[in-house]
Image: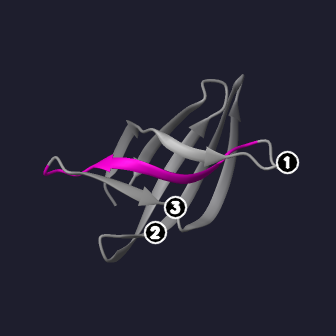
Amino acid sequence: MKRLNKPVDIVSVFHEDCSYPKPVKFKHKLDNGKIITINVDKILSEKHRKWGEIITVEYECESRVMGDDRRFTLEFTGNRLEWKLVKI
């Protein structure tokens, strides 16, 4: 996995029973400059962390990307409403 830690725009949903959003899909720029849309097929795990006032949720996900199964990590920072692609 390649560590990126880069901000991404994500389509996410909030459910009634959850206080945090679930990722649905996002756009990712490849090394060759091509931009692809990655649908989040599976959320394998979810880790909640709190450092003082900062609450983050880390999602370990798996999706089919350009014909291959790929794992990646997305992070949501609650107080900033910010998403990051941590690893892919």
Say which label, 2 or 1, has the lower sequence index: 1
Q: Which mark is residue 63?
A: 2
Instruction: Please say if 72 is above or below 31.
Output: below
Instruction: Please say if 9 is above or below 38.
Output: above
Please, what is the three-letter code of the amino acid marked with disc 2? Answer: Ser
- Secondary structure beneath dot 1 equals loop
Q: Which mark is residue 16?
A: 1
Q: Quadrant of residue 11?
A: top right
Instruction: Please say if 85 is above or below 36.
Output: above
Q: Residue furthest left?
A: 32
Q: Nearer the viewer, residue 21 or 1?
A: 21
Where is mark 3, residue-wise?
40
Q: Residues within 10 Å of mark 2 (few under 14, many from 20)?
A: some
Residue at horizontal 73 percent and vertical 43 percent from the top: 20
In the picture, measured across the screen, residue 84 lies left or right of residue 20, that is left
The segment highlighted magenta reads 20-32
Residue at horizontal 52 percent and vertical 37 percent from the top: 83
Q: Residues within 10 Å of mark 1 (few under 14, many from 20)?
A: few
